[in-house]
Image (cartoon, helix red, strand yellow):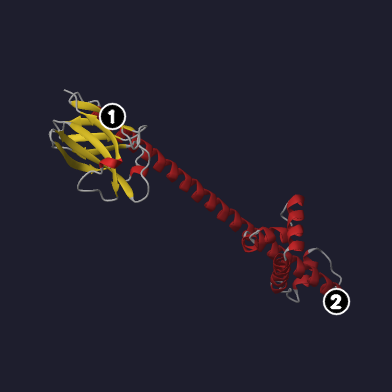
């Protein structure tokens, strides 16, 4: 248990004031047995209240009781010892009222602090919910834009089948020749190992002339696994190889993962 946090919570002041439930009182007593710091804090709170009470007991003016005595209709002289007794009682009564008032103010302050903390927590939760909602809306809008681009009537879809190094791999190239762009759907590719990246090649087949059109960057964190690349080339096929991070000037055909020819 975080003893310092427990002490600063205000529960010990409530315990000394008798404002806790029986169950809460037992809990404080158990903690006090277990942790010397809590016992010490309780003792210090009790001593502080006692000092406040003593300091707040101002006593009464010497003629105060004589005045009250006459106001009540008594004519006989007030005994001197009675004055002293009642002065003591009333002084302590005033002190107790003062101490109770101070404690009430403390409890109200604690309630206000708690209410403020709850309000701040609710506000933070609401802000987080709004942020998440905005992110969802933004993500959905981006996906809708992407899907519209892939569904464009000018888009040529090329299936890229798995090759010898990774027969189970596959991908798709969505080539919009009019816009000179190609979208690579790499959902069927395994995550590249550390220090490597996938590189996409536009290919002329006869003779074979590979031209790099880009890397599939930040593969792990791409939620859609769709990558947009520029392709101004007259492509006859597309291939994807695994290359050292940063890419290569020429494809490593031993690490050719997928390959597909452009249809007529």
Total number of numbered labels?
2
List x then y, in percent, for residue 26.
77, 54
User: Gap between marks 1 and 2, in whole Å?
Assistant: 100 Å
Residue 195, compared with residue 146, is above or below; it is below
The quarter of the picture where residue 174 lies is top left
Look at 23% across and 26% down and name the residue there: 157
Q: Is residue 57 left or right of residue 161?
A: right
- Crowd tier of the residue under label 1, counting other residues whose Cα lies within 10 Å: few below 14, some 14–19, many 20 or above: few
Q: Is residue 60 left or right of residue 127?
A: right
Determine which of the numbered discs, if any, sits on residue 80 in the image. 2
- Towards the viewer: 9 or 164: 164
The quarter of the picture where residue 68 lies is bottom right
Look at 84% across and 72% down and name the residue there: 85
- Towards the viewer: 165 or 217: 165
Can residue 27 be seen here? The reply is yes
Question: Which residue in the protein does label 1 denote?
Answer: 147
List x then y, in percent, for residue 18.
74, 57
Residue 99, compared with residue 202, is above or below; it is below
SS at badge 2: helix
Look at 77% across and 65% down and name the residue there: 71
List x then y, in percent, for residue 257.
31, 37
- Of label 1 and label 2, which has the lower sequence position? 2
List x then y, in percent, for residue 1.
66, 58
Look at 74% across and 74% down and name the residue there: 59
- Towards the viewer: 121 or 191: 191
């Amino acid at each position: 248990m975080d003893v310092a946090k427990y002490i600063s919570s205000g529960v010990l002041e409530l315990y000394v004031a008798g404002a806790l439930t029986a169950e809460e009182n037992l809990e404080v007593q158990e903690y006090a047995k277990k942790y010397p710091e809590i016992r010490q804090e309780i003792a210090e709170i009790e001593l502080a209240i006692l000092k406040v009470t003593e300091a707040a007991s101002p006593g009464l003016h010497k003629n105060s009781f004589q005045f009250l005595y006459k106001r009540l209709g008594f004519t006989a002289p007030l005994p001197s010892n009675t004055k002293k007794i009642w002065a003591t009682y009333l002084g302590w009564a005033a002190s107790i009222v003062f101490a109770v008032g101070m404690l009430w103010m403390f409890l109200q302050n604690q309630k206000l602090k708690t209410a403020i903390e709850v309000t701040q927590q609710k506000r933070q939760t609401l802000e987080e919910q709004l942020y998440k909602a905005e992110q969802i809306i933004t993500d959905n809008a981006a996906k809708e834009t992407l899907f519209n681009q892939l569904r464009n009537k000018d888009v040529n879809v090329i299936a890229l089948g798995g090759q010898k190094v990774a027969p189970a791999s596959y991908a798709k190239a969505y080539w919009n020749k009019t816009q000179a762009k190609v979208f690579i759907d790499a959902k069927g590719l395994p995550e590249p190992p550390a220090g490597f990246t996938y590189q996409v090649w536009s290919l002329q087949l006869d003779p074979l002339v590979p031209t790099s059109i880009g890397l599939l960057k930040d593969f792990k964190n791409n939620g859609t696994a769709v990558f947009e690349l520029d392709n101004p080339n007259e492509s006859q096929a597309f291939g994807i190889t695994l290359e050292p991070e940063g890419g290569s000037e020429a494809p490593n055909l031993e690490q050719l993962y997928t390959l597909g020819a452009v249809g007529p």
